[in-house]
Image (cartoon, grey):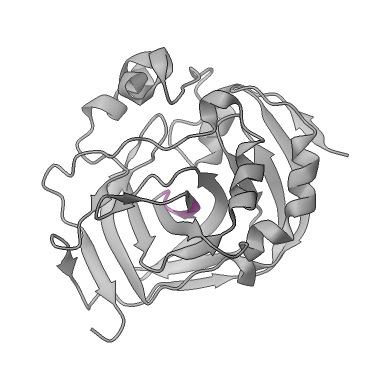
Amino acid sequence: MAFHLAVYVTGLVLLLASPLTGQSQEIPFGYSGVKGPDKWGSLNPHYSTCSAGKQQSPVNIANDDVVSNSKLGSLDMDYNSANATLINNGFNIGMLFGNDIGELIADEEIYYLKQMHWHTPSEHTINGIRYPVELHLVHVADDGKVLMVAILYQYGNPDPLIEEIKSYLDQLAKEKCSADEEIHIPVESVKSNNIERDTSKYYRYIGSLTIPPCTEDVTWYILGKVVEISKGQIDAMKALMDSEYKNNARPIQPLNGRKIELYEDGH
């Protein structure tokens, strides 16, 4: 039995580990028209960073402009299999984890995996190429710092993670969700090894959340290996979304002088 929970967007901001949790009410946003990305900054005073910020995400990664940094080292992503909650929050599909899913170590600091969610198409681009899907793994350190790992997907074989949770996605499809509501479905023991990840090559930069309130000082790691997902899996996920959110990728933001670092194992 699905557990249906209606909440204002404040709850969605909480899900994304934003420092703006605790606001009494937030304004729904969209991806076109009067609530589209170019209007986010004026929808609510708490969203002003979306238009005024100088370190916004996503960005285009141009290989000719990245700076190689062999000192960064491989990301240590130590995840366990654990229970989760599958969520349709109106503007994307994601999974929320408890405290036992695992951690990532970067820059000698420990970040804990809190949730993951999908964007269709990808938000980040590489050399101007936009991929069909981008998965965000949201990590938070004890001091509140946010670290995002982005995994890009191209058409190909089915993604093992989505294959594993297919029955739960089918349950989710039976529920209706508007942009200011959430639907929660418990998921038993998500196998962490089904999260395809290769940290031998990645890009790193400082950016922001890609939804309002567009909070900055978020560390981004975009994995260099593009993994595969089937078109059927993408179509099934997009079918869960309202028409305004089937394409839920924020447009590319200017770098404003920021440097994107590249790490490649063995280089």
In front: 264, or 104? 264
Residue 152, horizontal then vertical, whole percent: 44, 57
Quadrant assignment, res 113: bottom right
Residue lying at the far left of the rendered structure: 257
Of 148 and 239, the residue lying toward us: 239
Magenta segment? 135-144
Of residues 105 and 171, the one drawn nearer to the viewer in this rendering: 171
Q: Is residue 259 visible?
A: yes
Secondary structure, magenta segment, majority class? strand
Q: Is residue 248 above or below residue 28?
A: below
Front residue (pair 160, 223): 160
Q: Residue 163 placed where, x, y %?
A: 70, 60
Residue at 67 percent of width and 40 percent of height = 87
Q: Compared with residue 29, is residue 190 higher up or lower down, i.e. above or below?
A: below
Write down the quadrant of residue 89 in the picture.
top right
Quadrant that contains the C terminus = bottom left
Residue 221 lies, with reference to residue 213, above or below; the image says below
Q: Is residue 75 left or right of residue 113?
A: left
Which residue: 74% across, 53% down? 166
Q: Position of residue 96 (x, y in %)?
A: 63, 48
In terms of image quadrants, where is residue 71? bottom left
Q: Residue furthest bottom?
A: 266
Q: Position of residue 153 (x, y in %)?
A: 48, 58
Give the residue at x 42% y 54%: 148
Number of numbered labels in the structure image: 0
Q: Residue at x 88, y 39 (%)?
A: 1
| 134 displayed left or right of 179 | left
Q: Can residue 100 be seen in this snapshot? A: no
